Amino acid sequence: MDFQGTLFQAPASGVGDLGRTERRPLAGGAWLDVLRSWLPAPDEVFETLVRDVPWRAERRQMYDRVVDVPRLLHTYMIGEPLPHPLLAEARDALSAHYADELGEPFRTAGCCYYRDGRDSVAWHGDTIGRGSSHDTMVAIVSLGDPRRLHLRPRAGTAAADGGEPLAVEMGHGDLVVMGGSCQRTWEHAVPKVAHAGPRISVQYRPFNVF
């Protein structure tokens, strides 16, 4: 069942208290919120996602050749039921908590399945759609083996003046929210590592942010 709730109304939720998030201001009007062990029952949610999400492998053009995307993917679009009730509760809780800053609810949930340390995501910002010109948010719930989210200032932006690269370890059930100008003034990546077990990243986004 997908617990929709009313717009910006905080649902009765099993997820943790978002008032405990720790915010780190970043250069250029960006910020990062981190909350450890936020999602309850992470083992159950992880196992459900591995089993029930219709994962797909993609191939993309890279310069003069087509390459495999080094992770499995699926996106739940607006109105599609999420594969576990806690993910719907998490989305609604995030929408309620960040309503004053974001001004709209989180609408989509992108899922990435990192099967081992060879799976990764290259440097990028979510700048397709409004992320290229407007402040927005991307909220990430991490499940499975820990991986590090690396961030660096984007060249030629306000963040490049005084911004320092950083890395945040994302553990089982942790929440990381990138906000403010982060998608257009910073880049983020999850690089390959020598040894890592399976991990799933669930990314909540507002409408028209990719």
Image: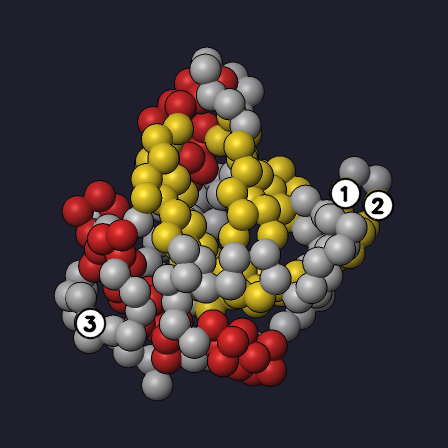
Distance from the alpha carbon under mark 1 to that under mark 3: 43 Å
Tell me where residue 137 appears, x and y as whole percent: 36, 46
Q: Are marks 1 and 2 in contact (CB under 8 Å)?
A: yes
Distance from the alpha carbon under mark 3 to that under mark 2: 47 Å
Q: Front-most of 175 and 91?
A: 175
Q: Front-most of 140 and 127?
A: 140
Q: Amino acid at mark 2?
A: Arg
Q: Amino acid at mark 1?
A: Met
Of the two numbered discs 3 and 2 in the rendering, the one whose residue sits closer to the viewer: 3
Q: Is residue 15 left or right of residue 146?
A: left
Q: Amino acid at mark 3?
A: Pro
Q: Is residue 60 above or below residue 12?
A: above
Q: Are marks 3 and 2 in contact (CB under 8 Å)?
A: no
Tell me where residue 149 appears, x and y as whole percent: 56, 44
Q: Which mark is residue 93?
A: none
Mark nearer the N terminus (1 vs 3): 3
Q: Which mark is residue 62?
A: 1
Identified at 38% across, 23% down, the residue is 28
Q: Is residue 207 left or right of residue 200?
A: left
Q: Front-most of 37 and 107?
A: 37
Image color mode:
secondary structure
Identified at 41% across, 55% down, the residue is 36
Identified at 51% across, 63% down, the residue is 172
Q: Which residue is mark 3?
A: 11
- Splitting the image into 4 quarters, where does residue 183 fall? top left
Q: Is residue 129 above or below residue 53?
A: above
- Do we see residue 208 in this rendering? no
- Do we see residue 167 in this rendering? yes
Secondary structure under tag 2 reads: strand
